[in-house]
Image (cartoon, grey):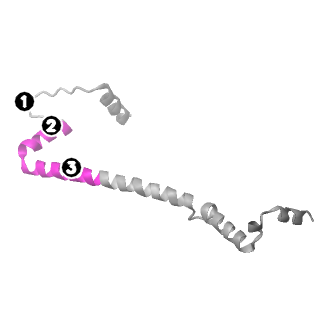
Amino acid sequence: MIRLKFINKLPAIFRNKYILTILIFLIWLLLLDTNSLISRYREIRNLHQLRKDKEYFLNKIEIEKSKLKELRTDNHNLEKFAREQYRMKKADEDLYIVLTPKEDRKIRRKNK
C-alpha cells in the first residue's frame, strides 16, 4: 500500500517503464560503467598530456641531434664540450670549478 502511494506521487513520465529503463541506462553509462564519461574525461586529459610530452621530447631529440652533429663535425666544439661537461683538461692546465649553492647541494645529494 505504501509502495503504491510512492509510485502514484511520481510524475507520469517516470512511471513509464521505457523512460525509466532509459534513465537507468543513462545513469549507468554516465557514472557506473568502466567506460563512463568521468573515465573518458580522465583518459582524454591524459592523452593531451602525453601529446604535449611527445612534442617536448621530439623537440629535445632534434636539439640533441643538432648538438651531436656539431660535435662530430668540429673538433673545437668537441673539446669545448668535453671541458664543460666532463671537466677534462690538458696536462699543463689547472682547473678551477665554481659552483652555485644549488649545484653544490645537488652534487652532495648524489654522493650520499
Q: Which residue is mark 1?
A: 92
User: Which amino acid lies under the numbered mark 2 shown in the image of this protein?
Assistant: Arg
Q: Residue at x 70, y 70 (%)?
A: 19
Overall secondary structure of the magenta stretch?
helix
Sequence-wise, which precedes: disc 3 or disc 1?
3
Q: Which residue reaches farthest bottom? A: 18
Q: Is residue 52 left or right of residue 59?
A: right
Q: Residues within 10 Å of mark 1 (few under 14, many from 20)?
A: few
Position of the C terminus, as image quadrant, is top left
Q: Which residue reaches farthest front? A: 12
Q: Which residue reaches farthest right? A: 1
Does the CB distance between marks 3 and 1 fall below 8 Å?
A: no
Q: Residue at x 85, y 62 (%)?
A: 6
Q: Residues within 10 Å of mark 2 (few under 14, many from 20)?
A: some
Q: Is residue 54 above or below residue 94?
A: below
The region drawn magenta spans 57-86
Q: Is residue 79 left or right of residue 110?
A: left
Q: Which residue is mark 2?
A: 83
Q: Is residue 84 above or below residue 98?
A: below
